[in-house]
Amino acid sequence: MIKKKEFELKGYREIQPALPKDLKHVLLNWTKIPIEESLNRSKEFYKIMAKRRTVRHFSKEDVPKEIIENIIRTAGTSPSGAHTEPWTFVVIHNNKKKQKIREIIEEEEEINYKKRMGTTWTTDLQPLRTNWIKEYITDAPYLILVFKQTYSSKSDGSKKLHYYNDQSISIATGILLAAIQIAGLVTLTSTPLNCGPALRNLLRRPKSEKLVFLLPVGYPAKDCSVPNLYRKPLDDIMVEF
């Protein structure tokens, strides 16, 4: 075991926690609600979320910016490993920027569909009627690009590792989807293959950030249709002991 003096002489620095050592702990702000109210809330929330669908046809009607901000705030309440909060939500409202994003994605998606994805994958997508043309990118009033932060910098210039950033960003995006649905808006969770570096450069994001999802957000087009799909029943997704 290296003694402290020897430790310092060898040029090592004592590792400091990312959060303050004297971090204050406070009482949880929580109020128990009656069982009946809890049951009603859970039922109502399920009813709202059960109507959530993946939408690819958007109205060009604008959405108040405050609604988008509240949605992002809600996603930011997500838990994260060691409270690193490893997320950046890039909100795009500018039409020229949306057009450039669409050009980058469609160029790569055409290659994906024709070469990279393979016959099995593209065949599985046929009933959903998807292709490399992404009109929703420019039709939807807003785009939210979700970046995960793999690390950040401490005040002394050293790296602050973001533990469990994959899990953390996935949970935050789930909360983001719920917030979008609760606000009466629709979206699509897209994962633009092979577009991450180009979009990161376009949006001037640091190399520590990786694109995970792109979500168009807005109202559905009047003639919007969706596949007639059914979700698995509770017995198929829950196991009890």
Image (cartoon, helix red, strand yellow):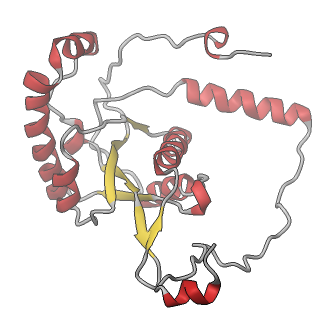
Q: Along the horizontal axis of the image, is 73 left or right of 112? A: right
Q: Residue at x 57, y 81 (%)?
A: 14
Taking the image as drawn, is residue 143 in sight? Answer: no
Q: Nearer the viewer, residue 219 or 3?
A: 3
Q: Residue at x 23, y 16 (%)?
A: 121
Q: Nearer the viewer, residue 32 or 8?
A: 8
Taking the image as drawn, is residue 75 in sight? Answer: yes
Q: Quadrant of the C terminus?
A: top right
Q: Is residue 22 above or below residue 174?
A: below
Q: Is residue 58 above or below residue 173?
A: above
Q: Quadrant of the N terminus?
A: bottom right
Q: Residue at x 62, y 15 (%)?
A: 237
Q: Position of residue 197 (x, y in %)?
A: 19, 53
Q: Along the horizontal axis of the image, is 214 left or right of 135? A: right
Label count reads 0
Q: Is residue 219 above or below residue 28?
A: above
Q: Position of residue 150 (x, y in %)?
A: 40, 58
* Image-quadrant location for residue 43: top right
* Image-quadrant location for residue 179: top right
Q: Along the horizontal axis of the image, is 200 left or right of 224? A: left
Q: Is residue 70 above or below residue 118?
A: below
Q: Position of residue 133 (x, y in %)?
A: 13, 31
